[in-house]
Image: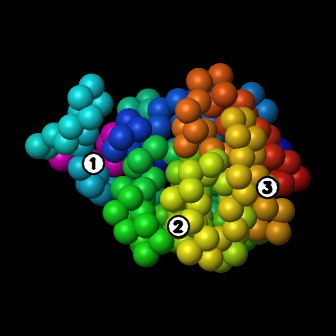
């Protein structure tokens, strides 16, 4: 039977939403390995909106679900309608939206909280014994929900120290490498937490998807 993967988005654009390369290449890998996906996002306003040309904050508001529809080509579901029973795994691409919209890690570090719908989805998948993948900065969300999980965000000392303060175990990795926590069924890769090329992002996302799918067997 074809596997069904839920992909959790946080907007559109790496400075205030989902990292577009990470999301797109994750979706590509899911289809490459014969699975299908459904994109989800919470129906809430972004923390803020960033001009991706200048890096400056803009005086407007945008909705996470509406912005995520840009990546999903309109085919995105409100996270409140997520059911773990309908999916074999959950994957979270990175981008600052993971740390600003799906959680407040960008502002509170290890004292962060996770958006309630996001926390519920992760808990449901984990308690069902189904695997979770997370790219780039998204592993910080997993660390706040699953205690003593082993993840990677690459080499960044400040973020790895925050993960340890949250009760997680951090494994240093380089480009295209993944960390697999077999006990918790969590697979992570650093992606743009390192100074990466797009082909390296593709390889990292591919390995995450492949490892996640292997855990569904």
* Drawn side of residue 104 relative to residue 5, left or right: left
Q: Which residue appears at 53% of the width and 58% of the height?
A: 159
**Picture disc at residue 162:** 2
Circle number at residue 63: 1
Relative side of 132 to 83, left or right: right
Quarter of image, res 62:
top left
Find numbered disc 1 in the image and state the secondary structure of the residue it sits on: loop
Q: Nearer the viewer, mark 1 or mark 3?
A: 3
How busy is the neighbourhood of tag 1: few (under 14 within 10 Å), some, or many (20 plus)? Answer: many
The extreme front residue here reads: 157
Q: How is the image coloured?
A: rainbow
User: Which residue, given by chain and number where applicable, does mark 3 sit on?
Assistant: 180
Q: Position of residue 75 (x, y in %)?
A: 46, 37
Q: Position of residue 175 (x, y in %)?
A: 69, 35
Q: Earlier in the sequence, mark 1 or mark 3?
A: 1
Between marks 3 and 2 in the image, the one whose residue lies nearer the viewer: 2
Residue 66, given in percent of the width and then of the height, sits at 32, 42
Q: Is residue 90 magenta?
A: no
Frontmost of labels 1 and 2 is 2
Q: Is residue 17 visible?
A: yes
SS class of the residue under badge 2? helix
Q: Which residues are magenta?
A: 61-68
- Which residue corresponds to the image point at 88% horizontal and 53% vertical from the top-left? 217
């Amino acid at each position: 039977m074809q596997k069904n993967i839920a992909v959790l988005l946080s907007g559109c654009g790496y400075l205030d939403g989902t990292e577009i390369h990470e999301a797109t290449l994750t979706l590509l890998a899911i289809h490459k390995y014969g699975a299908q996906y459904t994109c989800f996002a919470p129906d809430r306003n972004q923390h803020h909106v960033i001009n991706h040309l200048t890096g400056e904050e803009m005086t407007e508001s945008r909705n996470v679900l509406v912005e995520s529809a840009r990546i999903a080509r309109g085919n995105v579901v409100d996270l409140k309608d997520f059911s773990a029973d309908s999916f074999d795994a959950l994957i979270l691409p990175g981008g600052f939206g993971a740390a600003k919209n799906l959680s407040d890690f960008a502002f509170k570090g290890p004292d962060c909280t996770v958006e309630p719908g996001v926390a519920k989805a992760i808990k449901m998948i984990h308690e069902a014994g189904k695997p979770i993948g997370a790219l780039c900065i998204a592993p910080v969300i997993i660390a706040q929900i699953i205690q003593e999980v082993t993840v990677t965000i690459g080499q960044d000392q400040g973020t790895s120290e925050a993960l340890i303060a949250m009760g997680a175990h951090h494994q240093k990795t380089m480009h295209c490498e993944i960390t697999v926590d077999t006990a918790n069924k969590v697979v992570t890769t650093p992606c743009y937490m390192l100074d990466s090329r797009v082909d390296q992002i593709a390889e990292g996302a591919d390995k995450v998807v492949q490892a996640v799918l292997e855990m569904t067997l």
